[in-house]
Amino acid sequence: MKELLDQVDLYNRGSKAYDKAEVYKELDQKNFDDFERLWKPMLAKRRAEVHTAAEAADANVQDAHWDWVGKAKIAASKLGQETFAVECGETQGLMLVDLNGFGRLDAQKGRELIYVELLATAPWNRRKFVVSPRYKGVGWILIATAISLSIDSGFHGRLGLHSLPQSESWYRGIAGFTDMGLDASKKGMHYFELTHEVADSFLRKKAGAQL
Amino acid sequence: MKLHFTNDWLRQNIAADPGEDPEAGPAIDGVPEVARLTVQPTDNVAPAESRARVQLRIGLGVLVRKLRIRDGLSVAQLAERANVAEDELRQVEHDPHYTARPRLIHQLSEYFSVPLVMLSQMAGATHDIDRFLYNKVVKYAAHSDDVGTLSSEERTVLDAFVATLNERAKA
């Protein structure tokens, strides 16, 4: 059942002020409707305009094939998968995580972690997608939520994920994830991991500081 | 679940971040190959046991023990009738960190007429775990006493649990 976790601040690029947004655990029909009615047409239209993976990356439309509704429904029936949504009026961001991930880094090899399977912000929040993106900070909220889940699950903030190319520098440089390089089993994407220590530093990070 | 960050933290970092929000997940058609370090294979990693799998195996041990007691069998007798190794059977009943071999699960499924798909999940032999099954198993195991005999009430609970496994396997 959908659960409101908390209200958070989301930066409105238009008004240059912070709007109140809600973070929910588990998606419901409202999120499915928003995805089908609002996200999907924008993604499909943009996807039709690009022809190569490089163009798709450049247009920030690499997630056009993600079936959020199908995946969320499967996740609701499975133990060990959770979905999250950020709402501010419409659904601004979505995340699917797996609680059965295991560390690959030597420092945490074999230890439980939260694996972020999918994480996306709404198309209208993407700078390369629209001329004037609406909100900024959805990704921060969702990654910090994943770390929170990891802490509450007893995994001490440990995370793992495969990054889309355009986000690699954020995970590596801003959030302090360890880039474990190209993963041949995942279409050449980079695999990243966050350790307990860096997760702790990330949540205490001062603005602009390097981890 | 609690969020372990504050709005102050969020505001400061969002304001200082000049870039795009991060995303994660599989790309459309792969990304252009570049010469970079490849991730080490994980085949030889011995992963830690997830708590859910341990709980399911505890449930499996309780179920096998109760079914055996219900039928008035010793471990040795059940091993002989189900054509499985006695020591493996003991480990299934008592060691939640033991991964039962597929053949043992198959033989127990046949002998007790409990769906293989349910026992396989309880043995931790599948990646996906049915949330409904998990909840039922944990509840069943938590309400079972580890005694050598079954009361009529325990027998009823056991029969109901097995019936639930059968129904779930058909769903």
Image (spheres, coloured by chain):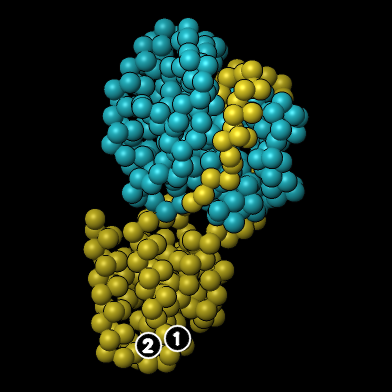
Chain colours: A cyan, B yellow
Q: Quadrant of the C terminus of chain A?
A: top right
Q: In the image, residue A121 lies at what x, y percent? A: 47, 25
Label 1 residue SS: loop
Give whichever of A18, A65 is nearer the camera: A18
Residue B131 against residue A84 in the figure, above or below = below
Residue B116 against residue A39 in the figure, above or below = below
Q: In the image, residue B39 lies at what x, y percent? A: 68, 36
Residue B9: name its quadrant. top right
Residue depicted at x 65% and y 40%:
A203
Q: In the image, residue B170 lies at what x, y percent? A: 24, 58
Q: Count residues near mark 1 (Cα–Cα under 10 Å), then give few for <14, some for 14-19, many for 20+.
A: few
Q: Which mark is residue B5?
A: none
The answer to which of marks 1 and 2 sits earlier in the sequence is 2
Chain containing the residue with disc 2: B
Residue A158 against residue B7 in the figure, above or below = below
Residue A6 shows in the view = yes
Residue A52 against residue A1 in the figure, above or below = above
Give whichever of B60, B108 is nearer the camera: B60
Chain containing the residue with disc 1: B
Q: Which mark is residue B146?
A: 1
Q: Which residue is mark 2?
A: B69
Q: Count residues near mark 2 (Cα–Cα under 10 Å), then give few for <14, some for 14-19, many for 20+.
A: some
